[in-house]
Amino acid sequence: SKVISTAASAAKLARSSALLTVRAYTQYSQGEWNGRLRQAKAENNFFEAKTIYDEMKLAGHAPSRETFHLLATTAMRNKNLGGTLEALDEMKSYGLVPDVIFYNIVLYTAAKQQKVDFCLKLKQEMQNLGVPANTRSYLAVLDACNRTRRFDKAFEVTRMMRAEGIEPTEMVFTKLLELCSHSPTLIPQAKVVFQEMIDAGIRPTSLSYSAYISLLAFNGKPLEAFEVSKQAAAEAKYQENTQGDENEDQQRPHINFVSSMVLAKALTRTNNLAEAVEVVELASHGVFDSVGGLKSVKTGKT
């Protein structure tokens, strides 16, 4: 009897505590609820964000679009695909149609978990709901293709993109080049991609040049890669001479350290030592010297 009485008292105390909590929360405004969610987002604490959202519903407050965006973004930062999908479903349950920014959050989270087919399914859902995709949407799907080596799907995605009137950007072309680098059989497609970028009037940056050069160097085409590296160096020099310091923040095309090393070693292995040294000196501005790369190239050792 004493145990039952103690349990009843504990239950009564818990109900009273919950009631006091709800009453306290009903005093919060929409902005205060979202402020708490923003704090949880800043701390990358999805558990806290979900707890706040549940308390918000318990207090009888209707979530806003910002509420769901904050919840989904926090889940994305924690690589929690289930959390982003839960936020998506909750948003729909309140009669709100998610916008492209929200869908992109889910797409990027799914891409990092290599869910290519799911990304394509989500993309179809966007279309069914009349939510137009943007370049970021397609970049997320391409990222998923890249992570899973789904070459066929990647080129299908770019066709879908163009069919919707969205022209590929430099980042899209770079993603395709990175994808092609995983297989020597895709060198012809990579050449087409690189030329399409040039024909579209898009000036290659360090990322696209480096991806293309690494692809050629890795797959038995070091001299072709060397010609591209000279093109990058010449363009960088031209921009430096014509622009000076006016656009310091603009990324001039150059070969990054890793790609330079890959190309220099590929040239060395094929006894193209003069070209290897030129790559090091032009593209890396002597930085290889500090790690022994220049010495190994000049001596023919790798």
Image (tube, rainbow, N blue to C red):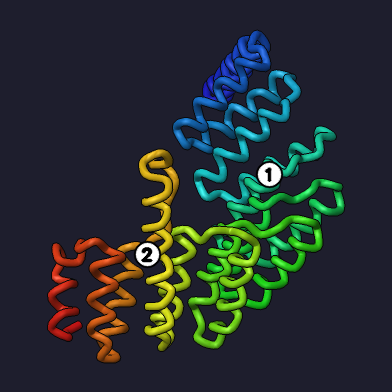
What secondary structure is marked by label 2?
A: helix
Query: Within 10 angstroms of label 1, few (less than 14), some, or many (20 or more) residues?
Result: some
Q: Could you tell me which quadrant the C terminus lies in?
A: bottom left
Q: Name the residue under label 2.
A: 233
Q: Is residue 19 visible?
A: no
Q: Is residue 89 above or below residue 40?
A: below
Please name whichever residue, 172 or 55, is drawn nearer the observer in this view of the structure. 172
Q: In this view, does 202 lie above or below 180?
A: above
Q: Is residue 73 left or right of residue 122?
A: left
Q: Which amino acid does label 1 sit on?
A: Glu
Q: Could you tell me which quadrant the N terminus lies in?
A: top right
**Which residue is drawn at the image coordinates 22% and 76% (left, top)?**
277
Q: In the orientation shown, which residue stands out farthest toward the front?
A: 242
Please tell me in which quadrant of the rendered image residue 245 appears.
top left
Q: Where is residue 125 in the image (x, y as percent from the top left)?
A: 80, 54
Query: Within 10 angstroms of label 2, few (less than 14), some, or many (20 or more) residues?
Result: many
Q: What residue type is labelled 2?
A: Ala
Q: Where is residue 59 in the image (x, y as percent from the top left)?
A: 69, 18
**Which residue is drawn at the image coordinates 61% and 77% (left, top)?**
192
Q: In this view, does 195 lie to the left or right of 301?
A: right
Q: In this view, does 33 lie to the left or right of 132?
A: left
Q: Earlier in the sequence, mark 1 or mark 2?
A: 1
Q: In this view, does 281 lie above or below 264?
A: above
Q: Residue 86 bears which disc, if any?
A: 1
Please tell me in which quadrant of the rendered image residue 122 appears.
bottom right
**Which residue is drawn at the image coordinates 58% and 15% (left, top)?**
17
Q: Is residue 176 left or right of residue 246?
A: right
What secondary structure is marked by label 1?
A: helix
**Which residue is drawn at the image coordinates 66% and 29% (left, top)?**
67
Disc 1 versus disc 2: distance between alpha carbons? 49 Å
